[in-house]
Each structure stands twice: as C-alpha cells, then as structure tokens.
Amino acid sequence: MVEKLTLFDKIWNEHVVCAPSGGLPLLYIDLHLVHEVTSPQAFEGLRLAGRKVRQPQKTVATVDHNIPTEPRGTPILDPIAARQIQALQQNCEEFGVPLFDMNSSDQGIVHVIGPELGLTQPGMTIVCGDSHTSTHGAFGALAFGIGTSEVEHVLATQCLHQRKPKSMRIEVRGRLAEGVSAKDLALGVIGQIGIDGATGYVIEYTGEAVRGLSMEGRMTLCNMSIEAGARAAMIAPDDITFAYMKGRRFVPRHWDEAVGRWRALASDPGARYDATVEVDASQLAPFVTWGTNPGMIAPVDGRVPNVDDLKTDRSAVERMLEYMGLESGTRIEDISIDRVFIGSCTNSRLEDLRAAARVAKGHQVASRVRAMVVPGSQAVKHAAEQEGLDRIFLDSGFEWRESGCSMCLGMNPDILQPGERCASTSNRNFEGRQGRGGRTHLVSPMMAAAAAIAGHFTDIRNWRFY
Amino acid sequence: MKPIRIHRGQVAPLHRANVDTDQIIPKQFLKRIERTGFGEFLLYDWRRTSDGKQDPSFVLNHPRHAGASVLVVGKNFGCGSSREHAVWALEDFGFRVLIAPSFADIFANNCVKNGVLTVVLSEAEVAEIARRAEELHRYEVTVDLEQCLVHDGHGLSATFQIDEFTRHCLLEGLDDIGLTLQHESEIAAYEARHSPAIR
C-alpha cells in the first residue's frame, strides 16, 4: 500500500538534501527573502568567514521595515535607519543579490511582493528573517521565519538543518457570514487554540470556509498563524491559487505543466495529522482584541471579559487590562479610539483596501481620529489609485501613504504616542508594539475603517454602505 | 560560538508567561547593524521608566539579582517576532541559560545559534526554581548539558530533554555553516537534480 501523505509531507520529502545519522535533516530552500533589519549581521558573518551567497538568484531583497511612508524622496531623518538601509544596498551589490530598493516600482512589504511578483509558488520551501513568512503558505508552500544566524546559513548554503515539525489540520466548517473576514477567522482560530496552541506544528487549513477564501484572505489567515505559535501554515493550491498567479512576472514559463505538478501536492485522502482541530465558521463574528496578545479576542457586539471567566492567570489579565486602560464588562462598541492603521503584511493588499474603501465611501473620519492607509507595496498602491481608492480614502479624511511595514511595528516614524488607542489591521497587539504605551486593538480592514468613522468600534454588520 | 557544557550560575526569576520578543528587545533598537551591545536595551520598557531611568521595582534591577546568568521564566517565552536581537540582548546582558515550561520555536532556534541553552522543565519544577531564586540569597543552580540535569545542591534535581544534534552543537560550540558545507557534494547533487533557478 502506498503511504498517504499530507501536503506538508510531500514538500518536506522533496526538499531533504540528506539526513545525516545523528544529525538533523538538511532541507533545501527554494526562495530566500531578505529585508534590511534581520540581514546586516548575516552578510557581515559571510564577509568575516570569506563566504559567498551560494544562490543569489534564489534570493530577493527589499526594504520595508524602517522606511518612512512619506512621499519617496523625503530624506530619512533617522541616521541609524538610513545606515541600515544603506547597508542592505551595499550588501546586495557586493553579494549580487537582486534588490527592490526604495525607489523601485516593485518595492513593498516582503510578504506582499513575493506573491505579487509570482516568486511565491506552490511546493516551494521559502524562508525569510521574519516571523510572518508563514504568509506564503497560502500558496501551498512550506514557508517559515528564521533568525539572522539562519539567514546567514541559508545565504551561505541554501539549506537549513531542520527538525521536522508535527502536523496539525485545522478544518473550518461552514461559511463565513457577511461582515466576517479572513482576519476574523484568523483571530477566531488563535482565540480557540491559544497563542501557543500550534507551537511545534505546521498547520494545514482545510474546509469549506478556507476553500471559499480569495488568495488575499488565505494570505491573511496563514500570516496570523505564527500568532498561534505555528512553525508554518499552508493551504493546498487550487484553481483560485492558479488564477491569482497566472501571468505574474516570475511564474514558470511552462505554465500548464507547473499547474499539473502543483495539483498533485494536495494531501492524500486519509493522510494522517498529528493533531486535528475543528472550527465552526458560523460561530465567528467580527472580532476586536482587548488584551496584549492576539488570543485575547471579543466579538464586536460583546464586552471586555470578566477576569474570573478566563482561564488565563489572573494577574496577567489584570496587567493587560491596566495596560490597555480597560475595565471588565465594558461594551466593545463603547471603546473609543484615537488612531486607525490600515496596512501591514496581514491586511494591506488590494482586496483589503477595497473592503476598507467600500466602508469609508461617503463617510468622514471622526474629528478626533487620525487614520492612515499604508498600501503593502508600490504595485498595490498603483492598482488602488487606478481604481480611485485613494480618492475615496482622501475624501473621507484618511491619509494615503507610501508602502512599507509602517505602524505595524513602528520602526519608522509612524508610531502611537503613550496612551493612544488604535484600531489596527496588523497582527500584534503586544505592549509597546506600535509605540511605548500605545494601545493596539486588532481588527479587520472593514472594522478598522468603520471605527475610524464612528470614532469607536462599531459592528460592521450594521453598517450603512453608500 | 562559545561551547556550553556545565554551567553554574545565579538565577533570576521573571514571573511572566508569553513574554514576546517585542518586550525582550523593543523595535527602536533593531536598527543597529552590529551584533553586539544589545544588553543595555534588554526588556527596555520594563526595566526603564518612560524617562529612561532604571525602574527599581523591576526584578532584574534588584541588586540581589545582579550578575545572574540563568533566567527562569514563564511559558511560551520568546513568542512573536523572529528578531535574533532578542537573544543577543539576553546573552549580552549575561544570560547563558534560560529555563521555562516552553519556548517559542524561532526564538529557541536562535538561542542555539548563539550558544544560549534553553532548558524545558515542567511547570512545577520551573515554579520551584523561581521560588528558591526569590527566597534564597544569591541562589545558584548547576546546569549540566552532559547529563541533561539541573541541580542546586539543596535537594533540587531535574532532568531535561534536548535533541542530540542541538546538544552536540552546544557542547562543542560548533559553527553549523561549516558543518553543512561538509555536505557540499550532496547539496550540489540536489541542485543538479532539481529545477533550475526560479528566474
């Protein structure tokens, strides 16, 4: 009998270069994405050891984390950030790595441009010195984040020593209701299994609700899987995947042959997983996080929970509430906000911006709120402008900015001031993530746009669309 | 990388679960292109008040924990961002061993690459070590990677598991790029067998 394999098993097996006895398997890496923050020390390591980049043509670099989102050409005022960007430029030149630089029309958040350019493909192994590399698993790739030492290792060898993680299937039954997005599904999964619920596992998402997601939605879902601790997340490629990819710049020339190969990647019926989780899509609502990790969620029509109702350690919850300036029992819709951030590798693609613009159209941002929209890439920005989304945002009082990671992690000048409260489409609500003392609530793009206009969280299911 | 075989050191307790790497090293310190000098920024927003002064109430600022080289922490330590700067900060501050009920995956990998040993013990064992670190003056433990054992000379003894490859790398302080390059012929053969470059 032929062994039944999962999507993950198939990609893993295909990429094992060798499995030395007493050692860990050596895994081949097909695509290595590089950005300015986690790479300088890796290139320096190569230089010190007199090593080269083994496969510069399987390596792609861009600047995203600390670049300003003011109009391009504005000087970078932070000299340390400027030096880091310059270091990437020099390193790419010295080692022959292609770079989509500040002024490139292909610049963007690394996890937005990989798929957009057709670099991200089913069946690949993809790494990047960034935890949200899990995003690329939406295409049926094995994609995971690594640290700088491993970046150096991949640059030098195109391989990594890897212990094979366990596999977890997350089956999402039923369909998402109107107003409930992929972001809410992602938050719902984390809320259900916990922020370390998938530590040590590679997740495969299956089920009707997952099949029904667009590629943008699948990327949002896989992107957030690291927030449940997952090593990686993946979704088997299908017609939706192939339709998204077709015609993109770096997809294989022998297209039909590639599609045939990719179709065979799907998990075999009856393949075994180390763990299985079921999620009921009909139980999901538009969620708002209230705490300082992404598992602390409440439906928008709910309340900040009572300390006694949670399984989490009491002192930890009390600490979260104090940091967030919230009290148990407060209605989520009564929480007013100061800032809105629509962007990040989670939610900055064209579909996300369309969803937010549809909500914003014909409305005005509340007078006390400052709201910014940061497209994920120059290509997203250009496409959005072609559709007139920039006009909708600007007419409604949103700022329309240049592409980058921006206020997701606040490495550039886009940060919260102490005590400011933000509705954010990003992925982490950790203490200080968006600025020391800043209070982050994670939401979907539709919910963020609605909050900008209402001045407080509001249920998108009751929204008045014009 | 410095080898680690048997480490004896003073223990500092940090009673928090899910300490993310944004806390361990806040973003404003990630812009440096060096690998050293991150220790002073470790847990910056917790160690320092908003005006940059040391917060005397934070545990790592207590004089009694000065010089600690073993940090005992809550579960899921190092979750979130892949930033290796978190490990560089811990190591530069003086920590060689971290003890917790669990660690986040990428963070644990990053520790190995820097010769920092992550020891996973049960919740009860971790709580006991933390309790002793709080109650006993200059409480020390011995972490023995050869025997996979933590003991303190006061009756506490706990074994831990670690995969053989990782243990070997840490014991010998191996440069694993060098190790991988020993498989050059296999890598080249793999590349010859598989599709050409993506572009």
Image: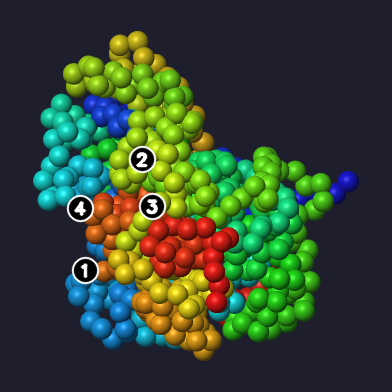
The residue positioned 44% from the left and 57% from the top of the image is A457
Q: State the CA–CA distance, disc 2 to disc 3.
A: 10 Å
Q: Note whether A88 is above or below B96 in the view shown.
A: below
Contact, mark 2 vs mark 3 (Cβ under 8 Å): no
The chain containing the residue under callout 1 comes to A
Q: Which residue is mark 3?
A: A335
Dot 4 and dot 1 residues touching (CB under 8 Å): no
Q: Chain of mark 4?
A: B
Helix, strand or loop at mark 2: loop
Instruction: Identify which amino acid the numbered label 2 is placed on.
Output: Glu
Residue A436 position, x and y percent, is 25, 54
Residue type, numbered disc 1: Ile
Residue position for label 4:
B37
Q: Are marks 4 and 1 on the same chain?
A: no
In the image, farthest residue toward the top: B155
Crowding around mark 3 (Cα neighbors within 10 Å: few <14, some 14 to 19, many 20+) is: some
Q: Kindly report which numbered mark, 3 or 4, lies closer to the viewer in this rendering.
A: 3
Residues packed near mark 4 inside 10 Å, few (<14), some (14 to 19) or many (20 plus): some
Query: Which residue is at 11% across, 46% downward?
Result: B53
Chain ID at mark 2: A
Instruction: Answer with left or right where residue A230 lies relative to residue A261.
Output: left
Gap in Å between the C-alphas at discs 4 and 1?
A: 15 Å
At numbered mark 1, what does the secondary structure look like: helix, strand or loop?
helix
Residue picked out by circle 1: A80
